[in-house]
Amino acid sequence: MKKVGIVMGSDSDLPVVSKAIDTLKEFGVPFEVHIYSAHRTPKEAAAFASGARENGFGAIIAAAGMAAHLAGAIAAQTTIPVIGIPCSSSNLEGLDALLSTVQMPSGIPVATVAVNGAANAALLAIQILGVEDVSLAEKLDAKRAADAAKVLAKDAGIMEKIES
């Protein structure tokens, strides 16, 4: 199975990124976590991205706050799918990170999830890997079915709550 690379611009992004880590663990997907800054360690970030395919990665999740363009810097160095997580900060509550992540030039795509949307970033990475890994795709199908069953169970009991 291919690995997922998780790169964050700072260790302050770990509380957000931990949801992606937990999701990948839940699905048994191997991963590595690194701290590389697009601005402070650009050579290391570029080396990680450019060697990702050869090092067994099938997708990379890049998380950064403020106006950092980590996901774009990573995507510029690889053709492996890159998923950006814009992280909220005290300045603009994540709007700056969101805009810097989604506003990519033509030819360098970055898939972007919601601000602090690490669980969805991991699920998207798992979907990407699931294109070639049938057992992983089956785990995703089972999760979707379980999630639907939870909603339907709540639907079945909602009138009891309202009428009580």
Image (cartoon, helix red, strand yellow):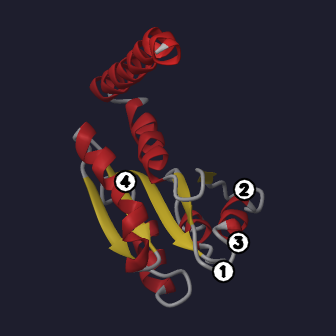
Residue 119 vs 33, above or below: the answer is above
The x and y percentages for residue 129 are 39, 38
Residue type of the residue flagged with mark 4: Lys
At 61% across and 52% down in the image, what residue appears? 112
Tags 1 and 3 touching, CB below 8 Å: yes
Label 1 is placed on what type of residue?
Asn
CA gap between label 1 and label 2 equals 30 Å
Q: Quadrant of the N terminus?
A: top left
Q: Classify residue 75 by image quadrant.
A: bottom right
- Residue situated furthest front in the rendering: 164
Considering only order in the chain, which callout, 3 or 4, is on the residue closer to the N terminus? Answer: 4
Given residues 131 and 20, the one toward you in this image is 20
Locate residue 98, reporting x and y percent. 67, 63
Q: Given this view, does label 3 or label 2 mark the residue nearer the observer?
A: 3
- Upstream in sequence: badge 1 or badge 2: 1
Residue 146 image position (x, y, % from top left): 35, 20
Q: CA distance from mark 1 to mark 3?
A: 9 Å
Q: Nearer the viewer, mark 1 or mark 2?
A: 1
The reply to whether the C-beta atoms of the residues labelled 4 and 2 are less than 8 Å apart is: no
The residue beneath circle 4 is 19
Compare marks 3 and 2 and give the one earlier in the sequence.
Answer: 3
Compute the Cα span from label 4 to label 3. Answer: 21 Å
Query: Which numbered dot is residue 107?
Result: 2
- Residue 91, numbered circle: 1
Q: CA distance from mark 4 to mark 1?
A: 23 Å
Is label 4 in contact with label 1 (beta carbons under 8 Å)? no
Say what amino acid the circle numbered 2 marks. Gly
Three-letter amino acid code at disc 3? Asp
Mark 1, Cα crowd under 10 Å, few <14 / some 14-19 / many 20+, is few
* Residue that badge 3 annotates: 96
